[in-house]
Amino acid sequence: AQTVTQSQPEMSVQEAETVTLSCTYDTSESDYYLFWYKQPPSRQMILVIRQEAYKQQNATENRFSVNFQKAAKSFSLKISDSQLGDAAMYFCALYTGTASKLTFGTGTRLQVTL
Amino acid sequence: KAGVTQTPRYLIKTRGQQVTLSCSPISGHRSVSWYQQTPGQGLQFLFEYFSETQRNKGNFPGRFSGRQFSNSRSEMNVSTLELGDSALYLCASSTGQVAYNEQFFGPGTRLTVL
């Protein structure tokens, strides 16, 4: 079985500051993919960033980057220069070919303040 | 390219009734996955269809069923509705490649069971 744990139900960050959302996971697979999804209020879920487990280099997408620690099974998301539009629920998700499905964490609600 | 569409967006039913939700994937995508999102249980995988065949199934009772048509559109049916079935039902489409399965989500159908 695979699990994803997000231990921060809520986080707050000031506009233009940096925030890091935590995620740990567990899987017995050696080949898997990790994702961060963003779900704004009453809007659909969109992919923020993805990481292939076989890649050692941390993924980066503009202001979003990850810190992927494979041995520790940790996958945190860093948002730099936070903007009001970043306010949303953020879900960490794991995909393995064996399970052939996304397993989601419980989410972190990010609030961005002026 | 049009995104994933789901109809209806909102639905109110009473206990014991049955309901059918529809999902149209991105053009060219052959896989459709369904997820149930509730405040208590979070995002849980229901099932995945690929080329009209159920490829994977989550841990939901038999009241939850689905199908996929030759044009990749998918429907999900819930029979004998219970109060606990109230949720946001999300569908996600992908190309269907098992090794890497980036999923694009629709806006969801919010089902309320009274």
Image: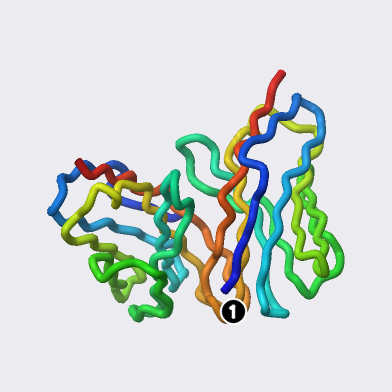
Residue A33 image offset from top left, x and y in percent: 67, 68
Q: Nearer the viewer, residue B88 or A73?
A: A73
In the picture, the quarter occupied by the C terminus of chain B is: top left
Q: Quadrant of residue B78?
A: bottom left
- Tell me which residue sits at (76%, 52%) in the image: A76
Q: With respect to residue A82, does B15 lie above or below?
A: below
Q: Quadrant of residue B59?
A: bottom left
Q: Is residue B84 left or right of residue A82?
A: left
User: Can residue A26 be seen here?
Assistant: yes
Chain under callout 1:
A
Q: Is residue B63 left or right of residue B94?
A: left
Q: With respect to residue A52, does B2 lie above or below?
A: above
Q: With respect to residue A2, does A90 lie above or below?
A: above
Residue B47 image offset from top left, x and y in percent: 39, 70
Q: Is residue A20 left or right of residue B60?
A: right
Of helix, strand and loop, which one carries label 1? loop
Q: Nearer the viewer, residue B102 or A11?
A: A11
Residue marked by disc 1 = A97
User: Can residue B2 be seen here?
Assistant: no
- Tell me which residue sits at (82%, 69%) in the image: A71
Q: Which amino acid type corresponds to the residue marked 1 in the rendered image?
A: Gly
Residue A23 image offset from top left, x and y in percent: 70, 54
- Tell me which residue sits at (62%, 79%) in the image: B99
Residue B15 image offset from top left, x and y in percent: 16, 49
Task: Estimate how packed mark 1 is, as few (under 14), some (14 to 19) or many (20 or more) residues with alpha carbons within 10 Å.
Answer: some
Q: Residue furthest right?
A: A57
- Tell me which residue sits at (26%, 71%) in the image: B62
